[in-house]
Image: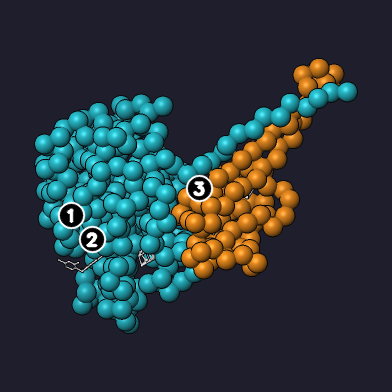
Amino acid sequence: MPRVRGWIEVDESHCKGCGLCVAACPQDVMHLDPERLTSQGYHPAALKSEGCTGCGICAIVCPDAALTVFREVIAPQRQATAAAA
Amino acid sequence: MTTPQVQRQIVYRRPKALNDVPTHYCPGCTHGIAHRLVAEVLDEMGVIEKTIGVASVGCSVFGYNYFECDFVEAPHGRAPAMATGIKRVIPDSIVFTYQGDGDLVSIGMGEITHAAARGENITVVFINNAIYGMTGGQMAPTTLPGQKTTSSQNGRDVKRMGYPIRMSEMLATLDGASYVVRRSLHDPANIRKAKKAIRTAFEVQHQGLGFSLVELLSTCPINWGMSPVEALKWVEEHMVPVYPLGDYKVSPTVAALRIR
Ligand SMILES: Cc1ncc(C[n+]2csc(CCOP(=O)(O)OP(=O)(O)O)c2C)c(N)n1
Ligand code: SF4
Ligand code: SF4
Ligand code: SF4
């Protein structure tokens, strides 16, 4: 089985700490970072733990287009897949 | 030993059709989602260079600052009239208006109705948040029965203040209208459907099929006195029953449209 790892980047010039992404994340791996303040004075969204799948749902609900979502699919080599199957 | 193959993908990135400017919208206001969806559609269709937006009066009055296309600002309610002129003079352009419910249903009721009746080949993005956002949360023609606003402090009393106007249903009765639908921005599945409708509306114009309008149920957390997340719930529980989602007018030529 290929493994999937995702991560996000938050553009702090756009994020307003509204929390819509945090509420929508199906993996519950986001929070508003209490340690950071944006130049507009908001606590920006951030990943708080492992487990992001790169599903992109946070970006779909973000009103400020502050999120870039990445995904890495790690597939075992073909030979190994064939052997496993 | 096997070396794993690593494939990196960008699942989502900010659309190019949006300027790199922070918006003035309140945190969590879904005006921003509507902007993003319009920008994504303009990117996908590759039409940003020939698009002209018409901003209205309301919170989206500064809309012209946020898109990478040309923009003009219309007097309150008059965006469809201005869009009519632009589209008729530059027929190859893609012209859209972006209007709130105060702008479109109240002072601009005449302009939108006649633009639809004339079958103007323009696209209207209509944001229904059941209130006048910009001016401090007064009652709009779209305010729900019983809804408290700064000018209906005990709740909208329909006996005295009238009933909400369902604009999509009304416009759909006009022969000139080709595509009139209502969608909502309250959760990811509905946001996806909203984007598809916006894409269809712009395609209708692109192919010269006539007047298109997408009504989007949207939030105003600040004037509703709610958190952004509570406001989304309020749309789902209170607005959708009064403003049912659906396709109110899809002309036969539009129904035959195939979009990749
Ligand atoms: C001729 C005129 N009348 C009244 C106003 C005041 N005014 C500004 S915005 C607005 C209503 C905006 O509400 P809406 O269109 O729902 O947009 P929102 O701010 O909720 O996005 C009004 C009445 C004005 N600017 N010009
Ligand atoms: S991409 Fe999906 S899993 Fe990752 S933070 Fe966003 S919503 Fe959560
Ligand atoms: S939805 Fe967007 S603006 Fe709101 S907290 Fe998340 S990243 Fe920030
Ligand atoms: S006043 Fe309401 S509609 Fe206007 S930006 Fe704020 S939340 Fe959005």
Q: Looking at the colours in the rendered structure, which chain would you say is drawn in orange? A: A
**Labelled pair 2, 1 in contact (Cβ < 8 Å):** yes
| Residue with the mark numbered 3 | A60
In primary-sequence order, the first of circles 2 and 1 is 2
Q: Nearer the viewer, residue B94 or B207?
A: B94
Instruction: Name the residue at 39% across, 58% down.
Output: B23
Q: Position of residue B9 (x, y in %)?
A: 60, 34
According to the picture, the residue beneath numbered tag 2 turns out to be B57
Residue B12 vs residue B187, the one in the foreground: B12
In the displayed structure image, the side of residue B101 where residue A59 appears, left or right: right
Are the residues under marks 1 and 3 on the same chain? no
Farthest residue in the front direction? A39
**Residue B210 in view:** yes
Q: Chain of mark 3?
A: A
Residue nearest the observer in this picture, B169 or A51: A51
Helix, strand or loop at mark 3: helix
> Which quadrant of the rendered structure holds the C terminus of chain A?
top right
Q: Choose mark 1 or mark 3, whichever is in front.
A: 1
Please state which amino acid type lies under the numbered disc 3: Ile
Chain coloured cyan in this rendering: B
- Determine the residue located farthest toward the bottom in the rendered image: B154
Q: Is mark 2 within 8 Å of ligand 1?
A: yes
> Residue drawn at (42%, 49%), measured in percent from left and top?
B20
